[in-house]
Image: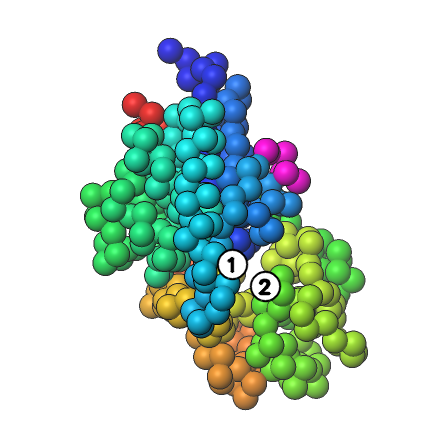
Amino acid sequence: MNSKNTKLSFLISGGGTGGHVFPAIAIGQALKQEFPESKIEFVGAKGRMEMKKVPEAGFRIHGLWISGIHRKLTPKNLSFPFKVIDSLIKSRKIIKKNKPAVAIGVGGYASGPLLFMAAKMKIPTLILEPNGFPGITNRWLGSSVNTICVALPGMDRFFDKEKIVLTGNPIRQDILTPISKEDARHYFGLDSHKPTLLIIGGSLGARSINSAVKRGLEKLKNAGIQIIWQTGSLYKEEHEVPGVQQTFIRKMREAYGAADLVISRAGASSLSEICALGKAAILVPSPNVAEDHQTKNAVALIEQNAAVLVKDSHAKMELIDTAIELIKDAQKLSEMQSNALKLALPNAPELIVAEIRKLMK
């Protein structure tokens, strides 16, 4: 039977952050390429970013009335049991209507009810865990799903090793298209010969990174270093910078292409992109995430000499000096770039689709 001509249905659930949403979309696109006639629909949490981003990517999405439990005592937690029951009922209806060949979860609130119900209804199930420390939803689902795709080694501490497959984390495919450093710097109006530092703290921004950069602007200028700086929407500031400052960088292919060194948080998607492109990086893990999972993500690169760690609490005093010292050390940069590439799994969507295909048999 020619699988490419077989009409199939798939459900992909999860979201809440770009680290969940963009890999989910990448999996959906890879499934569409593998099974062009298939019906692929998403399930997200009402009010979260997936409800906007998934339709923009050309897929239909169903919204569940679901959220997490607040860690502090709050009346909002009283509605949680009702949200779970409502989401389980709606998930069952979505599954019965779509009859998916496989249900896929990428983490986030919405993947819990959908994958739990799919497993209960004997639908083959697969989840993606991109972080070095699993989120609460995936930890809860681990015992009931069939396959667990992971981005980092050593995840048998949390899941049944018989279910684990190392696939990597799907990233935005457009950033993989090669671009010369000269063309990338020209796009931003930068000097093609000057060392260039890319600073990204996520779409919302990172206070500690921004404070360190603001404090070190004169040092960077005196060192002859130009910057591309994504300040983030929460921390937009107006002041002169020796390079490009943007609230949000839409052309990440050009931004990475221009950079000799990247300063970044240690979210799973950012690290996957850094490795896939072979970029040397200084990682400043966010302290404001569950189980300090960004530090655990960063350790995987640091142990392989593919990145340098600066603690969030030390960023203001250490970050810029570390960046200047590193960007001037061509041999060290080259070693880190090579080691980052060794950790890359840029064909993650195809590897995940291969696991989905196995479940269909």
Q: Which dot, 1 or 2, sits closer to the camera?
A: 2
Residue 242, position in %: x, y? Answer: 75, 75
- Residue found at the far top of this picture: 1
Residue 3, position in %: x, y? Answer: 42, 17
Is 228 positioned to the left or the right of 290 in the image? right
Q: Amino acid at mark 1?
A: Ser
Are the residues at dot 1 and dot 2 in contact (C-beta closer than 8 Å)? yes
The residue wearing badge 2 is 202
Give the residue displayed 54% in from the left and 67% down from the top.
264
42 vs 216: above or below: above
Residue in front for this viewpoint, 7 or 357: 7
Residue in front for this viewpoint, 67 or 134: 67
Which mark is on residue 270? 1
Q: Quadrant of residue 327?
A: bottom right
299 vs 64: above or below: below
Mark toward the start of the polypeptide (1 vs 2): 2
Residue 26, position in %: x, y? Answer: 52, 40
At numbered mark 1, what does the secondary structure look like: helix, strand or loop? helix
Confirm whether residue 183 shows in the render.
yes
Is 340 positioned to the left or the right of 50 in the image? left
Confirm whether residue 192 shows in the render.
no
* Image quarter hosting the N terminus: top left
Residue 25 magenta-highlighted: no
Give the residue displayed 26% in from the left and 56% down from the top.
158
Number of numbered discs on residues = 2
Is 236 positioned to the left or the right of 87 in the image? right
* Image quarter hosting the C terminus: top left
Q: Amino acid at mark 2?
A: Gly
Q: Which range is magenta? A: 55-60
